[in-house]
Image (cartoon, grey):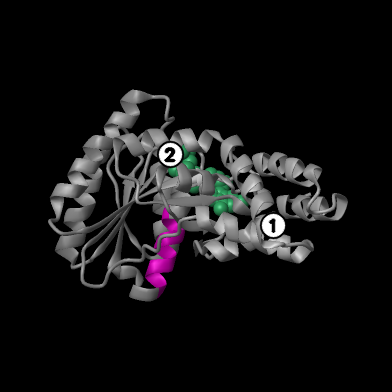
């Protein structure tokens, strides 16, 4: 049963307005990855608002719940800017969907600007397979991929990719990076070096750093956002695998705790399975209509 179905079942099982309803709702929101304190706060606010405003009935209570959650969410849109040089850096722990998201962003941007207006940087130099994976996407999409051999300095690869874009008259670079566990302080520190390269290479560039969060990760994602956010400024989240669990309350916890908006949502493995994050649509999927 998906998360929205479980919320629906709660509305069917316990009469909204009963004390038990608010307790069960808080428990369910914890399971939806809002985190304990935000889940309690949402449930308690709902209880107070319903009492104060005389709200009753399933659909009115559900609408109030959605309105409260809406107040905690943050959405950001980050398409390439036409008049700027754009650098998108994609970060995250292992296996969350970084490389796939780079390819999806590339496909989306290429559909607007043309595939010859984008350069991809194979900034995951850790594994040879990672470089091949990005090259494979580049071939499928007809997009240039700048890569060096395995083991080379990721900051140098990204620097080269920016130089290649500048000399080709291309304004958008999307850089993949190696998966790094947030618990590895050496790898997290490496991000600082990559970030210095991209912030100094092209003055006035539109630079966005996206942290990829796997919707199935749970509360650990908050910790990931905290630690990556301590090394670089994270402009927005890419919430991936939102298709497989539809548990994505984590993005609300991260918005509230760290002020980081969500930029994109991934709902599958195909190129077209990446959409700009729209809070209203997200909440419809998350708690059901
Ligand atoms: N269902 C689903 N699968 C996804 C999504 N995004 C990525 N994946 C899958 O997740 C797996 C890992 O994706 P990658 O893009 O290789 O992840 P990564 O973060 O680059 O992994 P590392 O480079 O090893 O750290 C692949 O099988 C992808 O197809 C998504 O939004 N939904
Ligand atoms: Mg990868």
| Element type at mark 2 | helix
Q: Residue at x 16, y 61 (%)?
A: 166
Residue 225 is labelled as 2
Q: Foreground residue, 56 or 103?
A: 56
> Is the distance from the Cβ of mark 2 to the nearest ligand 1 atom less than 8 Å?
no
The 10 Å Cα crowd at callout 2, few under 14, some 14 to 19, many 20 or more, is many
Task: Indicate the position of residue 271 as horizontal and vertical percent values.
Answer: 51, 62
Magenta segment's dominant SS is helix
Asked whether 279 falls inside the magenta stretch, the response is no
Of the two numbered discs 2 and 1 in the rendering, the one whose residue sits closer to the viewer: 1
Judge whether residue 33 can be spotted in this image.
no
Q: Residue at x 82, y 52 (%)?
A: 9
**Label whose residue precedes the other's in the sequence (2 or 1):** 1
Task: Indicate the position of residue 1 as horizontal and vertical percent values.
Answer: 79, 49
Residue 50 is labelled as 1
Q: Is residue 222 left or right of residue 207?
A: right
Asked whether 106 falls inside the magenta stretch, the response is yes
Q: Over which residues does the magenta segment extend? A: 102-111
Q: Quadrant of the C terminus?
A: bottom right
Q: Is residue 10 left or right of residue 95?
A: right
Give the distance between the C-alpha atoms of the residues marked 2 and 1, in whole angstroms: 33 Å
Q: Foreground residue, 207 or 28?
A: 28
Q: Specify the quadrant of the image occupied by residue 225.
A: top left
Q: Specify the quadrant of the image occupied by residue 124.
A: top left
Question: Against 44, is 267 above or below?
Answer: below
Q: Is residue 239 left or right of residue 19?
A: left
Task: Indicate the position of residue 150 as horizontal and vertical percent values.
Answer: 33, 35
Task: Indicate the position of residue 67 as horizontal and vertical percent values.
Answer: 59, 61
């Amino acid at each position: 049963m998906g998360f929205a179905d479980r919320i629906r079942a709660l509305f069917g099982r316990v009469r909204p307005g009963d004390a038990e309803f608010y307790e069960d709702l808080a428990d369910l929101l914890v399971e939806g990855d809002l985190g304990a304190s935000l889940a309690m706060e949402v449930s308690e606010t709902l209880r107070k608002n319903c009492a104060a405003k005389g709200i009753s009935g399933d659909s009115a209570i559900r609408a109030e719940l959605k309105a409260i959650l809406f107040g905690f969410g943050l959405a950001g849109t980050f398409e390439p800017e036409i008049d700027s040089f754009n650098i998108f850096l994609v970060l995250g722990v292992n296996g969350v969907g970084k490389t796939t998201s780079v390819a999806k962003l590339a496909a989306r941007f290429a559909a607007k600007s043309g595939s010859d207006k984008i350069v991809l940087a194979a900034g995951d130099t850790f594994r040879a397979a990672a470089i091949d994976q990005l090259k494979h996407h580049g071939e499928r999409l007809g997009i240039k991929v700048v890569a060096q051999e395995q083991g080379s300095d990721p900051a140098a690869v990204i620097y080269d990719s920016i130089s290649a874009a500048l000399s080709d008259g291309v304004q958008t670079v999307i850089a993949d990076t190696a998966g790094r566990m947030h618990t590895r302080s050496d790898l997290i520190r490496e991000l600082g070096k990559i970030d210095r390269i991209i912030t100094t290479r092209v003055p006035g560039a539109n630079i966005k750093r996206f942290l990829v969060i796997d919707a199935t990760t749970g509360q650990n994602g908050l910790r990931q956002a905290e630690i990556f956010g301590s090394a670089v400024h994270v402009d927005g989240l890419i919430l991936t695998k939102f298709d497989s669990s539809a548990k994505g309350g984590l993005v609300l916890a991260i918005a509230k705790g760290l002020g980081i908006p969500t930029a994109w949502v991934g709902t599958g493995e195909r190129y077209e399975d990446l959409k700009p994050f729209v809070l209203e649509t997200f909440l419809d999927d998350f708690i059901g209509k």
